[in-house]
Image (tube, rainbow, N blue to C red):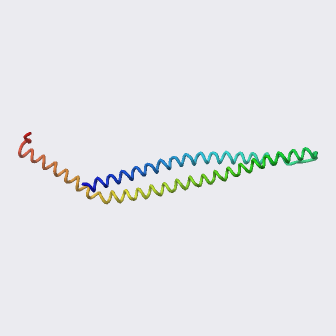
Amino acid sequence: MKALHRGNEIKRILDCKRDILQLDIYNADNRLSKIKSYLDENKRSLDKLSCTINELNPTGLMTRSEIYQIIRKQGVLLTERQHLIQKICQLEQDKDLEMNTISQCRIEISSLEKKQHKITQHFKPAWYKYVQNRINNEDSETQEIVTYGSKNI
């Protein structure tokens, strides 16, 4: 009987761990979707910035001051572009980290399910025996009451 209770306790613990891991997966999925949206937004900004930089290329006859002004604008835009590239790299690293977290949680969930299945298979014969004994005891009490009458209190 104690073994069955311990087996049920272990199964409950494994269920709690699985629920916690599923919550971790849910949270990681939410973070991953946010990271992907930020990544897409930054990539669009980078494309727009690259187009703006290409539009600033000097064409035709220009004065020296105009050329220097365009070069300064390009420098500012190139610095901004570099910052966007660094953000994109960081977001891709975060994305990979979240994907690894999700895969690790799924691996842990599958191992927990294997453990739970093994425990269930181990305690199944004892559980059936326990249930059968309870049924037999109830039948015996019923037969005893029918044979000898109701119990005197």
Based on the displayed image, in which of its 4 quarters is residue 146 positioned? top left
Based on the displayed image, in which of its 4 quarters is residue 124 positioned? bottom left
Direction from residue 56 to residue 26 in the image, left or right: left
Q: Which quarter of the image is occupied by the C terminus?
A: top left
Q: Tell me which residue sits at (7%, 40%) in the image.
A: 152
Residue 92 at x, y percent in the picture: 63, 53
Task: Looking at the picture, tell me which residue is in the foreground, 51 or 20.
Answer: 20
Direction from residue 118 to residue 153 in the image, left or right: left
Residue 34 at x, y percent in the picture: 59, 45
Q: Is residue 126 above or below residue 65?
A: below
Direction from residue 149 to residue 38 in the image, left or right: right
Task: Looking at the picture, tell me which residue is in the foreground, 126 or 94.
Answer: 94
Total labels: the figure holds 0
Residue 1 at x, y percent in the picture: 24, 54
Q: Tell me which residue sits at (71%, 49%) in the image.
A: 84
Residue 37 at x, y percent in the picture: 62, 45
Direction from residue 31 to residue 125 in the image, left or right: left
User: What is the residue that sits farthest to the left in this orientation?
Assistant: 148
User: What is the residue that sits farthest to the top in this orientation?
Assistant: 153
Q: Tell me which residue sits at (78%, 49%) in the image.
A: 78
Q: Tell me which residue sits at (60%, 52%) in the image.
A: 95
Task: Looking at the picture, tell me which residue is in the foreground, 50 or 63.
Answer: 63
